Amino acid sequence: MSDISEDVSSGEIDATDNIDITDDGGDFQGETDTQVHSAIESLSSMDELSPETWEGLDSAERLGALQNVENQIAGVQDRPAITVTSQDLPDSVYGGYDGESICINQGHLEGGQPVEEMFDTIIHEGRHAYQDFAIENPGFVDDNSLVNSWAENKDNYLSAEEYGQETYQSQPLETDAWNYAESIKNGVYENKE
């Protein structure tokens, strides 16, 4: 998913920062696994996310359903929920997170994209909100080296348009968001098919 804004906060590290270089991210991975399982459990019961029901919804109802997904994901991630909006975007852009809200491609919302893709976009962009929250709230995520890599990546973000999809997707922020969203999407839609 392409981000529509690359506005970032500083994540510089100085020599006085106390970073445990032996941290293997085990606690973070356990927390992520717990989030994924909780999200799958709560989102699997949302009828409006089934392909059959989604097809019968108008764009306002779809946007409402996606806002509900964001609200539930924010609760699972223990961060404030953010507003989901829509606007006209290039067809190749599914949505983005601008530091304050998630924007969804209006054309995709009105039709042409399956619910699974819209769902994936909301989860992916919500993960970027989680990453921002972790950067802005030291200690929220126990893995300081991971959070620092996210902050550094935000300061040196590489867009898919300029650097290509492979380079874009291999960045710490994007790798985490893509993997997280895919895990939840697969878990929810295995139960809906």
Image (cartoon, rainbow, N blue to C red):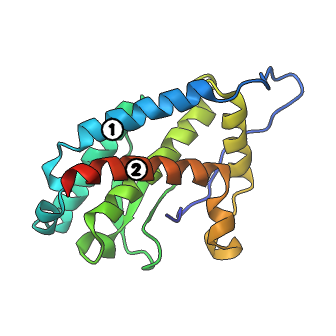
Q: Secondary structure at mark 1?
A: helix
Q: Is residue 140 above or below residue 134?
A: above
| Label 2 Cα crowd, 10 Å radius (few <14 / some 14-19 / many 20+) | many
Q: Residues within 10 Å of mark 1 (few under 14, many from 20)?
A: many
**Residue 168 in view, yes or no:** yes
Residue lying furthest right: 15
Three-letter code, disc 2: Ile
> How far across and how far down the image is residue 138, in percent?
64, 25
Q: Decide which of 103, 92 is in the foreground and name it.
A: 92
Q: Which residue: 30% across, 61% down?
A: 116
Q: Between residues 74 and 10, which one lies in front from this camera angle?
A: 74
Compared to residue 38, the image places residue 185 above or below, namely: below
Q: Which residue is mark 1?
A: 39
Up the image or down, 146 lies above or below 175; here it is: above
Q: Secondary structure at mark 2?
A: helix
**Where does the image place residue 174, in percent across and percent down from the top left?**
59, 54
Number of dots carrying numbers: 2
Question: In this view of the protein, can residue 80 be seen by the observer?
Answer: no
Q: CA distance from mark 1 to mark 2?
A: 10 Å
Residue at position x 38%, y 57% in the image: 120
Figure quadrant of the C terminus = bottom left
The answer to whether 11 is drawn above or below residue 19 in the figure is below
Number of the label disc, if any, that sits on residue 189: none
Residue 66: x and y in percent read 28, 53
User: Which amino acid type is marked by label 1?
Assistant: Ala
In the displayed structure, does residue 172 sit left or right of residue 94? right
The answer to whether residue 41 is left or right of residue 141 is left
User: Residue at label 2?
Assistant: 123
Foreground tag (1 vs 2): 1
Residue shown at the point (17%, 42%) measured from the top left: 45
- Is the residue under label 2 in contact with that under label 1 (CB below 8 Å)? yes
Who comes first in sequence, dot 1 or dot 2?
Answer: 1
